[in-house]
Image (tube, rainbow, N blue to C red):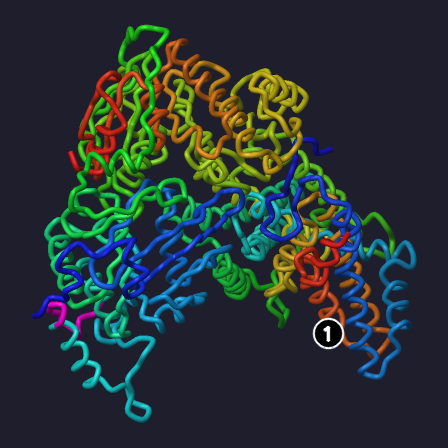
């Protein structure tokens, strides 16, 4: 698919594109599989140390995440939001913008979709869903536009602004739902339910799998298209790989930054919107368990490559789905899943070829 | 104050050095290699105790590397450093300071939020129990200031000190740490003329007290103003070490730039066309807001190569960036074919035929992690046969890239190979191919042959000549005076941000340029 692509542009290790030496070629599968293997080992140590059966737990985890059609469907449901937030994050990363504010876009997008779902109820089903998704995307894009403009115009560091705006978004939506859109007769901080015809149709009976996942796949394809085939994607990529070069050949950096943030926020907003329309059916205060932040992990683990992002999202989906289920069937705490996720992340960003003992081995090979 | 007898006359040099006291500093066969570049190539240097010793040479001649090796900031690959005849190993600045060697860098190493006194004491804090012994420090500080013949407001924050005062503070700090070999890396480059004069007073005084002062500079008049001895470096080697008495700027300039070049007779007579670039009273600030180009005015005509000679850092970079559209000028105008473009975007200017060969090939001229095709494509991105309706035609782009690679003889990779895989010379051919595949209207060529092998240099020169024949107006910036003289129809000389000379091709010789560039003429 990608012929012109020589590098992803994500600011992490392991993107060398020079024809690798034989030693490096051998290292490659290890580099990709390594994080997962190490994570499983560390997880096993934690399990054994706490007096539990590691193999049995892993087997249960596998069963619950991939053991049958319903389990697989639930894994896909869990993968959907992090696939989208992963793509949203990766767009910004590959453009050289460390946007860690997808969580914020997700919240405002989710609220916009919920608002459309319980307010514009007179619209017919498909149109209402379309309007809700579009509004969600727009809300997310506008939210990301704030740090984008600050960065493009005044070089305000985007890490600080996007991180902080996450909290603003979470608290803003919390305020909106608690003070203006609280569902009647409910103690919790929730908006009213969206109209039933705004809810995404289920594809399988005992699962919340909806067209949201298919939509996320479409976005994945669009993402691949953007960076491999589109002129604007080329400009974004050059901006990310070498902004000085990009400027010198006449790419408008300010515009590239704005576009990167808009697209990133758009997808982040859609991620939130689809979560409301397909899973929650209403806006719930503080509803996200950190989809936006997991998206950062997904983008990094997938190295900005569309297929990599998809795989990483499925992995995190399986972990969170399986983890939620084994909690029901055993006394394994959910924290174990968090440990696994964390260990995978740590080892994913380690560049194996830079470790001293690996380097010595490479020199001998 | 009694004068040290060793400073009174020209210091004893060379022959007698081995029989009497060994020199304060002796460097033998020092070699330092950075990748493929020999920064120092078997350098021998002797510096006697006391007096001021200047080290001159072009940029990249190896002066700073040599001094950084002496100060423990650079680990030499081979060679010996002797202090008073005793071989020593200096691998950190702390060791250098312990042996009495101190260095004042071009950028001062002071903490702006602390007072002058606190900065002085940093690293060697006098204390009484747990407390900073402010009074003891102050006594010491005043002593040293008196020794230097200067004054200092010790409680003032460094942030509020003038540049000259900061430099004096740095010198004071070296003395506070008991340094008696003081290295200055282009100390006057940040000073006003008045401050520079004050500095010279301080340096003479220190030399008079028996301190050994090593002074790196570009400016020949400074050498003759204060140094007793001068060492000339060129391309990593010491080419001469001589007393300033009995020498003259002319001779030093020749030593600095190297052998004279025979100027070849031009095949084509100069018949300049219409003015393409007209620059009028252009002033530009650098990133720190310092005015680095002042009131520059010149023009370049079609079919003309105008060379710009000058010591690096004289304002060339800012001028180039303003011409390309990467930097807004403070005042003044730039006209391209009669149209004002001083505030036009890079892309706007490129569409009008501005081509740019960056001096920083790896960081700006090319995108190393991207493929060769991606490095060539960007300035053609509005070409409908390569990209239409926002969609790239990958096959056409690869074909286009391949045609340029073969036309400009880029070896080492195809359209999809990463640019990182190419050698410097081939990468420059790629850049040239991108910028010159269509004859530019205005070509800004900054150090086009830097780091390129001989074969590549000839090729680049041919390309420049070809585009000149095709009617391009070219601004050529280079540190190779031979290249400038050989290729240019006219030569501008820039010194401290001002264009101080505009010479016809026949009037320029390396000596004359050398004198103008160093402010000696």
Residue furthest left in the image: B1
Residue B268 seen from this side: yes
Quadrant in the picture for residue B115: bottom left
Task: Point out residue B249 in the picture as x, y percentages from the top left corner.
Answer: 19, 38
Residue A180 seen from this side: no
Task: Point out residue A172 in the picture as x, y percentages from the top left corner.
Answer: 49, 61
Q: Is B120 situated left or right of A160 in this image?
A: left
Quadrant in the picture for residue B495: top left
Quadrant in the picture for residue B155: bottom left
Find out whether residue B150 is within the magenta segment.
yes
Residue range highlighted in magenta: B147-158
Q: Which residue is mark 1?
A: A335
Q: Is B330 situated left or right of A195 in this image?
A: left
Residue furthest bottom in the image: B129
Find out whether residue B209 is within the magenta segment.
no
* Residue drawn where x is 49% and y is 20% of the image: B459
Task: Point out residue A11 in the picture as x, y percentages from the top left corner.
Answer: 58, 51
Q: Quadrant of the N terminus of chain B?
A: bottom left
Seen from the viewer's position, the closer of residues B17 and B466 is B17
- Above or below A59: residue B11: above
Seen from the viewer's position, the closer of residues A160 and A3 is A3
- Above or below A243: residue B194: below
């Amino acid at each position: 698919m990608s012929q012109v692509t020589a590098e992803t542009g994500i600011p992490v290790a392991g993107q060398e594109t020079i024809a690798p030496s034989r030693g490096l070629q051998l290292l490659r599968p290890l580099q990709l599989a390594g994080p997962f293997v190490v994570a499983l080992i560390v997880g096993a140590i934690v399990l054994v140390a706490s007096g539990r059966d590691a193999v049995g737990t892993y087997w249960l985890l596998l069963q619950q995440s991939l053991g049958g059609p319903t389990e697989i469907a639930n894994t896909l449901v869990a993968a959907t939001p992090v696939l989208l937030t992963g793509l949203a994050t990766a767009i910004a990363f590959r453009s050289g913008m460390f946007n860690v504010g997808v969580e914020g876009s997700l919240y405002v997008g989710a609220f916009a979709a919920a608002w459309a779902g319980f307010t514009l109820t007179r619209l017919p089903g498909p149109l209402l869903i379309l309007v809700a998704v579009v509004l969600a995307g727009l809300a997310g894009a506008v939210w990301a536009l704030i740090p984008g403009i600050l960065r493009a115009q005044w070089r305000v560091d985007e890490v600080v602004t996007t991180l902080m705006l996450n909290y603003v978004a979470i608290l803003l939506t919390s305020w909106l739902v608690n003070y203006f859109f609280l569902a009647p007769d409910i103690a919790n901080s929730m908006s009213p339910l969206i109209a039933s015809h705004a809810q995404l149709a289920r594809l399988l009976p005992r699962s919340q799998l909806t067209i949201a996942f298919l939509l996320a796949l479409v976005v994945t394809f669009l993402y691949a298209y953007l960076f491999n085939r589109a002129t604007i994607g080329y400009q974004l990529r050059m901006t990310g790989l070498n902004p000085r070069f990009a400027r010198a050949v006449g790419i408008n950096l300010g515009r590239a930054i704005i576009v990167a943030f808009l697209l990133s926020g758009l997808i982040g907003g859609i991620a939130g919107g689809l979560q409301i329309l397909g899973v929650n059916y209403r806006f719930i205060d503080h509803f996200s368990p950190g989809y936006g932040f997991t998206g950062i992990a997904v983008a990094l683990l997938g190295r900005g490559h569309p297929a990599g992002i998809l795989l990483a999202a499925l992995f995190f989906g399986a972990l969170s789905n399986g983890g939620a289920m084994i909690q029901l069937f055993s006394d394994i705490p959910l924290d174990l899943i968090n440990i696994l996720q964390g260990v995978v992340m740590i080892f994913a960003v380690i560049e194996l070829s830079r470790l001293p003992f690996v380097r010595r081995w490479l020199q001998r090979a | 104050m009694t004068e040290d007898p060793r400073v009174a006359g020209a210091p004893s040099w060379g022959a007698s050095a081995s029989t009497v006291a060994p020199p304060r500093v002796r460097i033998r066969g020092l070699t330092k290699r950075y990748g493929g570049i020999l920064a120092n190539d078997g350098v021998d240097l002797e510096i006697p105790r006391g007096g001021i010793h200047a080290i001159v040479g072009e940029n990249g001649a190896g002066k700073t590397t040599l001094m950084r090796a002496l100060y423990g900031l650079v680990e030499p690959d081979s060679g010996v450093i002797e202090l008073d005849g005793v071989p020593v190993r200096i691998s950190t600045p702390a060791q250098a300071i312990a042996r009495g060697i101190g260095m004042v860098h071009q950028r001062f190493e002071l903490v702006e939020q602390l007072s002058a006194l606190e900065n002085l004491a940093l690293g060697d804090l006098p204390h009484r129990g747990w407390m900073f012994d402010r009074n003891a420090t102050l006594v010491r500080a005043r002593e040293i200031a008196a020794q230097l013949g200067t004054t200092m407001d010790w409680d003032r924050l460094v942030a509020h000190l003038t540049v000259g005062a900061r430099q004096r503070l740095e010198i004071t700090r070296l003395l506070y740490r008991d340094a008696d070999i003081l290295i200055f890396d282009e100390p006057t480059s940040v000073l006003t003329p008045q401050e520079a004069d004050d500095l010279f007073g301080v340096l003479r005084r220190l030399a008079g007290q028996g301190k050994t002062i090593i002074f790196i500079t570009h400016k020949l008049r400074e050498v003759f103003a204060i140094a007793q001895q001068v060492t000339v470096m060129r391309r990593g080697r010491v080419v001469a070490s001589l007393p300033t008495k009995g020498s003259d700027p002319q001779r030093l300039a020749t030593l600095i730039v190297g052998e004279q070049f025979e100027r070849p007779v031009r095949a084509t007579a100069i018949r300049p066309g219409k003015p393409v670039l007209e620059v009028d009273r252009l002033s530009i600030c650098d990133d720190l807001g310092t005015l680095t180009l002042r009131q520059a005015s010149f023009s370049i005509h079609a079919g003309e190569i105008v060379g710009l000679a000058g010591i690096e850092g004289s304002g060339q970079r800012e001028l180039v960036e303003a011409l390309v559209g990467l930097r807004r000028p403070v005042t003044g105008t730039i006209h391209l074919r009669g149209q004002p473009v001083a505030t036009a975007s890079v892309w706007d200017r490129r569409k009008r035929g501005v081509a740019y060969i960056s001096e920083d090939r790896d960081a700006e001229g090319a995108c190393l992690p991207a493929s060769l095709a991606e490095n060539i494509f960007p300035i053609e991105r509005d070409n409908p046969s390569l990209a239409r309706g926002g969609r790239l035609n990958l096959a056409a782009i690869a074909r286009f890239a391949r045609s340029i690679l073969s036309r400009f003889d880029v070896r080492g990779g195809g359209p999809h190979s990463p640019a990182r895989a190419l050698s410097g010379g081939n990468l420059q051919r790629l850049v040239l191919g991108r910028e010159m595949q269509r004859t530019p209207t205005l070509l800004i060529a900054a150090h086009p042959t830097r780091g390129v092998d001989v074969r590549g240099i000839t090729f680049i020169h041919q390309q420049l000549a070809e585009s000149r024949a095709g009617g391009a107006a070219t601004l050529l910036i280079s540190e190779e005076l031979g290249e400038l003289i050989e290729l240019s129809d006219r030569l501008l000389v820039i010194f401290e941000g001002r264009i101080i000379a505009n010479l016809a091709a026949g009037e320029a010789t390396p000596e004359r340029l050398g004198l103008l560039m160093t402010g000696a003429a």
